Each structure stands twice: as C-alpha cells, then as structure tokens.
Image (spheres, helix red, strand yellow):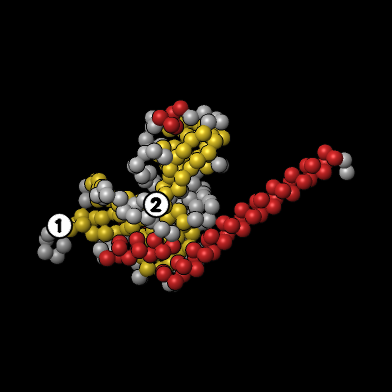
Amino acid sequence: MDRKSLVIVGVLASLSLRLFADDATVNRRKAETIVKADKLFGQRYAVGNGKPLRYDKLTETGPPDAVIYWHGSSYVIELIFASDGTVARVELLPETLLYSDNWSDVPNSVELSGTEMQWLVVSADVLQPLGKATATPHSCSQSGPNLYCTDKYELASVSHYHLERQNEKNAMEAVLREISILYRQPVNGIVEDVRVEGSQRQVKVAGQWYHGEKPGVEIFATAQIGSTVRLVTYGCTANEKVCIAVPEQSKSAATHQ
C-alpha cells in the first residue's frame, strides 16, 4: 500500500472513531435522561394499536425520537430528543393527538388541572434545567375560544393551550388542555447552504435547516454560504425538515410550529 493510500485509510479510520464517539455520547445522554423520566412519569405507553403515530408532513420527516408515558387515562407525556441527545421537548397532550392533528377528535371532557402545569415544569426541570423564569409576564394570544399562552425561562419556553367555555354555573372559564416545554438550543456555526421555500429564505447549519419566525428576518435574508451565524431555536428535534430560529441577540423565543 502506497503512502497516499495509507493517509486516506488513516483519515477514514479517524472519522469513524469520531462518529462512533459522538454516537456513544448521544446514546449515553438519552439513556441517563430516560432513567430519570422512568422514575418521574412511571408507566410507558406502548404504541401497538396498528395506527401509525402522527407526524407533521410540513415540518417533520417522521415520528420524533421519543419515549412516551401514560398520564392518567386520557393523556400522555412525550419526551422528545434533539440530535445531540439532549431533551428538545416535553409535551403533555391528549392520547388522541398521538394519531391525529385535529382537536375535534379529542373529547371535550379531556382536560388538565391547573396544578399539572407546575408539576410538569418541576419534572422537566429535573430532566434538564429550564433556568430561572424571566421577569417578563407570560404572553397570550386568542383565536375565538382558543387561548395560546407562553411562559419564558432562561433555557426553555413553556407553551400552554386553553379552551374557553361555559362551566356548570354558566360562567366562562379557561380549561387547560395541552402543555409543551420547548428547550433552548444555541446554533453557532458556518452556513453550509441556503435556499428559498415559498416566502422563506432558509439557511443550513451543521446539517439542519432553519428559517425565521416570519419572512424578512435580516439574518436569514442576508446570510451567505460560508458566513457565520449565531442563532437560537426552541424545541428543534432531530427529524424536523426545518426549525424556527431567532438571532442569538434577540430576547424573543421561537415557537415550535
């Protein structure tokens, strides 16, 4: 074997060892987190009813890398991982939404108590710290009877969905129906590629595509291949086609769509 061939073999061997080490680190992180989650959440949810798990064709390539737990008789907890083995999202949602993206398929009687929000936040903080709550009060937007709220933490964003409806006393109340904890992930690196999809210009960093919360965000409009970007994304999972991100200096949190 000549010198050139030996060099190539050495480089390939080095890359293989590095990839193996990276995979081992990812698997170790996930395993350590799952041990904690088993103690916190209890019974695993078995996906075996013949129906495929739901996924969003616009954003994801398939069901996420997740471990699912029962929560009562109607709810489940999804523990969803990022590509580096850290926690991307912790979601408390009706079991029905594992298979459907339509809330009309969820019975109106399915709801969460107010104390479950605090419990999930405390539990998620054990799995992976959320950091301190920011001084900014939580923000809400309303669409008809639907109320969508977000609480900000140093290392996460907590989204919760409520439905306004009349109670037995004919008074209006907001019923908690879903909670999603989206972890903050820094994205610092060199732009590998750029593309335009619809009205969005997207950039590719470390193998993952990103776009802004809305068209025209300057860093996405001007970034070129080879330029360095510093972004922040929330809840980005390993199998998403495109993740929403904001410039690192921005204090606003991206909301997972």
Residue at numbered disc 2 = 155
Of badges 1 and 2, nearer the viewer stands 2
Crowd band around label 2 with a 10 angstrom C-alpha radius: few (<14), some (14–19), many (20+): some
Crowd band around label 1 with a 10 angstrom C-alpha radius: few (<14), some (14–19), many (20+): few
Q: Residue at x 46, y 70 (%)?
A: 38
214 above or below 61?
above
Along the line of sight, which residue is nearer the eye, 177 or 247? 247
Q: Residue at x 44, y 62 (%)?
A: 127
Q: Name the residue type under label 1.
A: Met
78 above or below 206?
below
| 19 left or right, relative to 38 | right
Q: Which mark is residue 172?
A: 1
Which comes sooner in the sequence, label 1 or label 2? Answer: 2
| 7 left or right, relative to 42 | right
Does any portion of residue 136 appear in the rendered image?
yes
- The residue lying furthest to the right in this view is 1
Q: Name the residue type under label 2.
A: Leu
Along the line of sight, which residue is nearer the eye, 40 or 80? 40
Instruction: Give me the C-alpha separation between circle 1 and circle 2.
Output: 34 Å
x and y, in percent, of residue 9 in the image: 78, 45
CB contact under 8 Å: marks 1 and 2: no
| 44 left or right, relative to 10 | left
Q: Residue at x 44, y 37 (%)?
A: 211
Q: Residue at x 32, y 58 (%)?
A: 178
Task: Tally the marks.
Answer: 2
